[in-house]
Amino acid sequence: MDVYFFDCDKTLYDYDFHKRLPKLAELGGVSQYRLASTWWAGGFERAAEIGEYSTSEEYLDAFAEVTGARLTLSQWQEARKAAMTPIPGSIAVLHEAATLGTVSLLSNNPIPFKDSLPVLTPEIVGVLQDNDLVSAVLGARKPERRIYTRALGRFGVKPSDAILFDDSLANVEGARECGMHAHHVTKRDDGTFDTDAMLAAAHAFAAR
C-alpha cells in the first residue's frame, strides 16, 4: 500500500495568519497585540500542536485564561476559516492520489483543527475518510523524526512506500531523512502554487 501524506496550510489551502488574527481579536474582544504577544509568542500554540491540550474544550479554556478571549469552537472555526483559501489544483492532486493509494493529512495543528475539519476543509474531508493526522494527536511536530515514524505506523507502511507533500523545505527534508519520498510545494513566479509539479510527483511516486 502506498500512502500520500499532505500538509494542509500552504499546500492544500493557502493560509494567511494576518486575516485570522483580526478576526480572533474581533470575536474575542481583545487586541491583536494581546493575542499575538501572549498565546503565540508565549509558545502556547506550539504546545497545543504537540498535544498539550487533548480536547477542544481544554484548548479553548487555556486560550481564554492566557489571552482573556473566551471563544466558542464555532468562533474559533470562523477565525481559522477566514485565513484559509482552497488551492483548487492541490485539492485535485489529493483526489487523484486517492485513486493511486491511500491519502492522509499530516499537519502541524492543534486538536480544535482536527475537530473542525468538516467546517474548515469541506473540499477534502470526504476523500480523506478520517485519515486526518495532526501533530497534536501524534505528539510531535514536523520536522521531528518521530512524527513521521508515528504517522507511518498508523498505516503500517515502510517509509519507502509513503510520500509527503509540504510547503516547508525543512519538513520535506525531515521526511526524506526518514526514508520517505517527499515533494516540496512551491509557488511560481506569478505567486500561484505549482500544482502541476505536485501532480507529476504523485504520478512519479506511483510509477516507481
Image: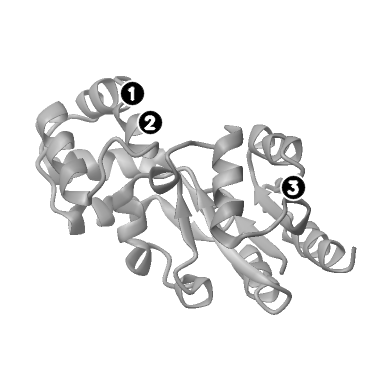
Q: Quadrant of residue 197?
A: bottom right
**Residue position for label 3:** 180
- Residue 87 can be seen, yes or no: no
Q: CA distance from mark 3 to mark 2?
A: 25 Å
Q: Is residue 163 above or below residue 40?
A: below
Q: What residue do we see at 64% from left, 37% from top?
A: 171
Q: What residue do we see at 64% from left, 63% from top?
A: 90
Q: Amino acid at mark 2?
A: Arg
- Residue 92's x, y, as percent? 65, 72
- Residue 128's x, y, as percent? 51, 71
Q: Which quarter of the image is occupied by the C terminus?
A: bottom right
**Residue position for label 2:** 46
Earlier sequence position, callout 1 versus callout 3: 1
Q: Select label 1 or label 3 by which is in front.
A: 3
Q: What residue do we see at 20% from left, 24% from top?
A: 34
Q: Nearer the viewer, residue 118 or 148?
A: 148
Q: Secondary structure at mark 2?
A: helix
Q: Residues within 10 Å of mark 2 (few under 14, many from 20)?
A: some
- Residue 8's x, y, as percent? 52, 53
**Residue position for label 1:** 43
Residue 68 located left or right of residue 109: left
Q: Amino acid at mark 3?
A: Met
Q: Amino acid at mark 1?
A: Gly
Kindly check if marks 1 and 3 are in contact, taking CB atoms under 8 A apart as contact.
Answer: no
- Residue 80 can be seen, yes or no: yes
Residue 141 located left or right of residue 38: right
Q: Secondary structure at mark 3?
A: loop
Q: Which mark is residue 144?
A: none
Kindly check if marks 2 and 1 are in contact, taking CB atoms under 8 A apart as contact.
Answer: yes
